[in-house]
Amino acid sequence: MASRYGLEIRAATAADAAGLAALFQASGQSIAASDLAERLEALRLGSGTALIAVEWGPPSGLVVLHWYRSLTAAQPVAQITGLLVGPDERRRGIGRLLLKAASQAARMAGCTTLELAAAPGEETLPAFCDSTGFERAGSLFTRPLRKKS
């Protein structure tokens, strides 16, 4: 999808499952590679995508994005349901690049709003959201995908 500073952002495939399992493990979560492969395929066939950041070796980061129709919005709404950067890879701009790629994918899907769901007790996410243009809306952070004219 995109490449910057030797970092490639692209759609995740089942072949990336082992590397993603290692990324989750490094972040304190245990998910079997076979389960990740199945979930990536289901996501690809549904209304969403998983994008990974790869520099060399296993993925350095992951963003999971879904879009859905709502009765209150004329266009689909995109929601980031997962944003993960490896502990040793943080503070290098990878999260921002993943967010930019997710925004582009959401616009291509016809979405006009991007939401980010924050897990309870998440300590660093609010500051990241503030610095990337999101506004708090209850338990979500939202931002428009189109510039206001």
Image: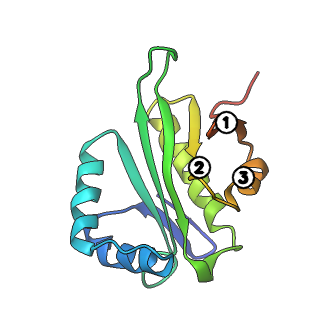
Question: Measuring 24% from the left and 45% from the top, which residue is drawn there?
Answer: 45
The amino acid on which the numbered mark 2 sits, given as a three-letter code, is Ala
Residue contact between numbered discs 3 and 2, judged by CB atoms under 8 Å: yes
- First along the sequence among labels 1 and 3: 3
Residue labelled with disc 3:
126
The amino acid on which the numbered mark 1 sits, given as a three-letter code, is Arg
The amino acid on which the numbered mark 3 sits, given as a three-letter code, is Pro
Q: How crowded is mark 2: few (under 14 residues within 10 Å), some or many (20 or more)?
A: many
* Figure check: 74 above or below 69: above
Disc 3 is placed on an element classified as: helix
In this rendering, position of residue 4 left or right of residue 15: right
CA–CA distance in space, label 1 to label 2: 14 Å
Q: Residue 118 carries which label?
A: 2
**x, y percentage for residue 29?**
43, 73
Disc 1 is placed on an element classified as: strand
- First along the sequence among labels 3 and 2: 2
In this rendering, position of residue 128 left or right of residue 111: right
Residue contact between numbered discs 1 and 2, judged by CB atoms under 8 Å: no
Q: Which mark is residue 143?
A: 1
In this rendering, position of residue 140 left or right of residue 134: left
Question: Measuring 52% from the left and 36% from the top, which residue is drawn there?
Answer: 107
Q: How crowded is mark 3: few (under 14 residues within 10 Å), some or many (20 or more)?
A: some
| Image quarter (top left, top right, bottom left or bottom right) of the C terminus | top right
Foreground mark, 1 or 3? 3
In this rendering, position of residue 136 left or right of residue 73: right
